[in-house]
Amino acid sequence: MRSISLAAARVLMVVMACAVAGIGQSSGSQSHPAATLRVGLWTLWHDKEVTASPASGSMATVRLCDGCVSSTFSQPLQIRASADGLNLSGNRRAASISLNGAFVLTAHGESITFHNAVRISANKSELILVVTLPVESYVERVVASESGSADSLESLKALAIVVRSFALHQAHGHANYDLCDSTHCQLLHWSGSSERRAAAHVAALATAGETLWFHGQRAAAWFHQNCGGRTASPAEAWPSTTQGRDASRQAMPWLVSRADPYCTAKGARGWSATVSLADLTTALAAAGLARPGWKTITVARRGESGRAVMLQIGSTAVSAEDFRLAVGRAMGWGKILSNWFEVSGQGTEFFFHGRGSGHGVGLCQAGAAAMSALGRDSDQILAQYFPGASVADEASGLAWQTLSAQGFTLQTLSPSDAAFLPQLSQAVAEAEGRSGLQPAGAIIVRGFRTTSAFRDGTLAPGWVAAFTEGNWIGTQPLSTLASRKLLVPILRHEFLHALVERQAAPGTSLWLREGLVEVWADAQPRGDAMVGSPTPQLKLDEVDGALAHATSEAQSEAAHRAAGWYAQRLLDGHGRAQVLDWLHSALPPAVLADIR
């Protein structure tokens, strides 16, 4: 479960009290896919030592064996790999340890704060660090790491679906974790641009739980940076004659070599490189591909796209993809950018001229970004790169259906949810009438099929019945909410969140945004906040922090009640029109001082 920061992520929740008892229970017997992934941390560094420290102002715990009781630690913990386990500060030893809470890991000059469980063990005197991430957190981080400045929402959504499919639909060959954080699997930067992370978050949330399917079966998927004008089939990138490769990659009709006019709309990406015989000899020997002593390189076989499939290096046949990866690991990824190249030799140097970047299989990121810029949506982008495949819910294999109504669209996996459209229309009409606000565009309501799917998709805590971010609302099953006569009040609350957030200026206090929703969502108008309503225990300056960092339902309820009390006082003193004007701009200091 992620740590939800309302102020930073603008994640808005409906907090349900005792009336929602039972909503946290899963409905239906559908098999549930993996909710978490074990991701190898710093896998290219081969660290032998790491320091764990509690994050400032937070609690961290350590468990010294699988069956041990966790204990808090307040001082830095030195962890060193040995031949048969871990050596810890304080002359302690362990086969493995588990860290939880909020803590900082420091190694090779890098420090990262984690809020997810990390397990540390050792193998051959090197540390093995494994982070357990919710699937959607993993997708968000990879999309942020792998995307570029040319991407926009629809290309990011397409990438998120491919990233999720890659992670869940195929094995990746690691013994100690599901995926690594390097380009061997999918690149994952543990820190990076907050702007890129925010865009990736929107894309991951909008596609939560969606993966690629082909004729009712889960489909494997890959992506690359630039196809150079034509994608490659898996058989070109990973020929069956290559030791250790999966020959089944060839039998994938949704992954065929096809022209990509979008990638080259502004010209094909060409590249050239000069690499010495000595450097190539070292790289290939290190990768176990060719012994020293060879003198020549020729392209022995090309694939349908024109890419090199097999190379003849001296007397040894080498896969072109293995050759590219060996050079990249030894000399950096800016040398041999793709397998689409010509090669010539002169004395002790080899000259490469090529086009594109990456293995060329599946989604071309350059082409996807160009399609998005032309107004194509994520479904159209995926149809270009995975012909015949379709997007469906990972748990059920069902496709999301979109039902349109006045002011909102409903996304659902259950056709019977159409029966709830009148109640949703009632909720949006009440939200607009009470707030005086109108939506700037259609609000998207996604009704998840099960409670577990809702939680996994939104990463919301167990007491939350619905979740709003921007103009996107996710809910627990509509049928569950309706059976408890909670559908209209919950959706009214969420529509208010969407309306208020759309109107709020950047930096508007969280207490004001949440408080207005609390006031207008109340079935019985509160009237004067000063009559018959006790002053909240939380001071105004404490409310934002309490809203952002509530760790229980009771704390969250108290913070929301306080926000509503202060917002009602503001409405009583100045009226709705004036408060809405301040929502667009900012509260005057004198008014803020009076509310305090």
Image: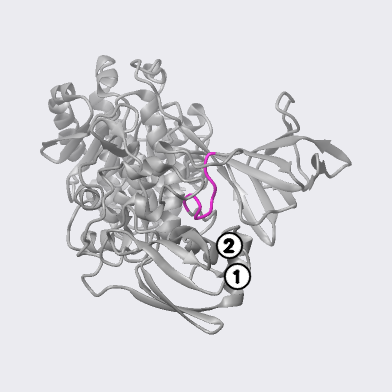
Return the x and y of residue 549 as percentages of the image width and height.
52, 40
**Residue at left 67%, top 44%?**
128
Judge whether residue 569 can be spotted in this image. no
User: Which residue is the site of mark 1?
Assistant: 281
Residue closer to the observer: 455 or 372: 372
Q: Is residue 183 magenta?
A: yes
Q: Quadrant of residue 254?
A: top left
Q: Secondary structure at mark 2?
A: loop
Q: Do callouts 2 and 1 mark residues in contact (Cβ within 8 Å)?
A: yes
Return the x and y of residue 322 as percentages of the image width and height.
49, 58
The crowd level at tag 1 (other Cα within 10 Å; few <14, some 14-19, many 20+) is: some
Q: Which residues are magenta?
A: 178-186
Residue closer to the observer: 299 or 49: 299
Q: Secondary structure at mark 1?
A: helix
The crowd level at tag 2 (other Cα within 10 Å; few <14, some 14-19, many 20+) is: many
Left or right: 501 in relation to 559: left
Cα–Cα span, label 2 and label 1: 8 Å
Mark 1 residue type: Thr
Return the x and y of residue 3 as percentages of the image width and height.
51, 40
Magenta stretch secondary structure, dominant:
loop
**Residue at left 54%, top 62%?**
326
Return the x and y of residue 61 as percentages of the image width and height.
70, 36
Q: Residue furthest front?
A: 315
User: Which residue is the site of mark 2?
Assistant: 290
Residue closer to the observer: 180 or 374: 180
